[in-house]
C-alpha cells in the first residue's frame, strides 16, 4: 500500500525543513508529500522548491491565502489533491523517526483510523535541534519529555494498541486514515476558524460512521518541536461546534471537502 504524507505548515520554514529531511530519510518512503500551507510567505515556497529539486518523490505545495487560522480548509485542499488511498497527517513541527511511515502502513486497517503519539522536545532541546539540524534522537539523550513514547517495539505495539471509540487525546499531528473514510464524513469541518477542536470533531464523525480509533503505542514515533501555544480566542465557539456534532450524532459536515473534490481546486 502507498500513502500520501500531508504536512501542515504556516510561516515556520526552519521547522518544516527538518520535518522534510526526516520524511525523506524514511525506510519506507511516502509515494508523495503534500504541504498543506495555511498562507505562508514566499520563503516557505522557496524552501519547498529546493526540496522538489532534490528528490524524485512528488512534493506538492498546496497553498491558501493567509486569512487567519484555517487548518480545516488547508487540510481539505491537500487531501483533495492526494493521489493515494491512504493519508498520513502530521504537523510541520513533527520530526519523524525513520520507521514512521512504515509503522503507519503496517498497522493500517479497514474501518479504522490511527492515532499516534509524540515525544515533546523541551525548549532548550529544540534550540539545539535548530542549531545542529538534528533529526535523529536516542532514548537516553536529554531534552525528551514523555520519554516512554520513544520506546520502539512492535511486540509492545501489538499488546497495547487497541481499537476504541475514545475521543481523549485526539491530535492530527500524528494521524492516518483511508481517504475514502475521510470523504465519507466530508473531511474536516471548515466552520472551524482559529485553533482548536477541528480534529476532535472530525473524529466524532468518523466514530459515528463506525470507523474506529486505533492507538499506536511504541511505533510511529515522532518528535514535537517546542513552540509557544496558539491563540485560544476562538476556542469557546469551536467547543460549541464540537458539542453540536456530538449531541446530534452527525455523520458528516456540510462545509467540508466535497467542494474541492467536485471543483477545480482538486485538479
Image (tube, rainbow, N blue to C red):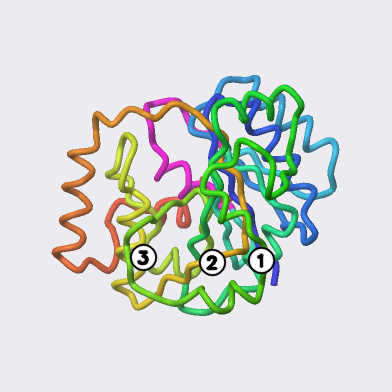
Label located before the other in sequence (1 or 3)? 1
Q: Secondary structure at mark 1?
A: helix
Q: Is residue 64 left or right of residue 231?
A: right
**Number of the front mark, 2 or 3:** 2
Contact (CB < 8 A) between labels 2 and 1?
A: yes
Q: First in sequence: mark 2 or mark 1?
A: 1
Q: What is the C-alpha distance between the residues marked 2 and 1?
A: 9 Å
Identify residue for label 1. 103
Which residue is drawn at the image coordinates 63% and 38% (left, top)?
61
Q: Position of residue 122 (x, y in %)?
A: 55, 33
Sequence-first disc among 2 and 3: 3
In the image, taking residue 165 as reference, residue 234 lies left or right, namely left
Residue 200 shown left or right of residue 7 in the figure? left
Residue 46 coordinates in the image, percent (x, y): 71, 24
For label 2, the SS is loop
Q: Which residues are magenta?
A: 63-81
* Residue 230 vs residue 131, the one in the foreground: 131
Q: Position of residue 172 (x, y in %)?
A: 46, 51
Membership of 49 in magenta stretch: no
Label disc, if present, on residue 185 of the rendered structure: 3
Q: For mark 2, what is the residue?
A: 216
Kindly report the distance in space between the C-alpha atoms of the residues bearing marks 2 and 3: 23 Å
Amino acid at each position: 500500500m502507498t500513502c500520501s504524507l500531508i504536512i501542515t505548515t504556516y510561516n515556520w520554514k526552519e521547522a518544516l525543513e527538518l520535518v522534510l529531511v526526516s520524511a525523506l530519510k524514511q525506510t519506507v518512503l511516502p509515494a508523495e508529500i503534500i504541504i498543506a500551507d495555511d498562507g505562508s510567505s514566499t520563503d516557505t515556497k522557496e524552501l519547498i522548491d529546493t526540496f522538489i529539486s532534490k528528490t524524485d518523490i512528488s512534493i506538492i505545495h498546496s497553498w491558501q491565502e493567509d486569512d487567519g487560522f484555517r487548518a480545516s480548509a488547508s487540510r481539505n485542499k491537500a487531501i483533495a489533491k492526494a493521489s493515494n488511498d491512504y493519508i498520513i497527517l502530521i504537523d510541520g513541527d513533527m520530526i519523524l523517526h525513520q520507521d514512521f511511515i512504515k509503522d503507519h502502513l503496517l498497522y493500517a486497517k479497514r474501518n479504522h483510523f490511527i492515532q499516534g503519539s509524540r515525544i515533546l522536545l523541551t525548549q532548550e532541546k529544540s534550540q539545539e535541534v535548530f542549531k545542529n539540524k538534528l533529526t535523529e534522537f536516542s532514548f537516553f539523550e536529554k531534552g525528551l519529555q514523555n520519554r516512554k513514547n520513544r520506546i520502539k517495539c512492535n511486540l509492545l505495539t501489538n499488546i497495547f494498541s487497541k481499537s476504541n471509540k475514545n475521543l481523549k487525546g485526539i491530535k492530527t499531528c500524528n494521524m492516518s486514515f483511508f481517504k475514502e473514510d475521510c470523504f465519507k464524513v466530508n473531511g474536516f469541518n471548515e466552520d472551524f476558524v482559529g485553533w482548536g477542536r477541528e480534529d476532535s470533531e472530525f473524529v466524532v464523525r468518523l466514530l459515528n460512521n463506525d470507523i474506529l480509533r486505533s492507538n499506536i503505542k511504541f511505533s510511529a514515533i515522532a518528535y514535537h518541536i517546542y513552540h509557544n501555544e496558539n491563540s485560544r480566542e476562538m476556542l469557546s465557539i469551536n467547543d460549541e461546534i464540537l458539542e453540536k456534532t456530538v449531541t446530534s450524532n452527525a455523520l458528516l459536515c456540510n462545509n467540508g471537502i466535497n467542494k474541492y473534490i467536485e471543483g477545480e481546486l482538486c485538479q
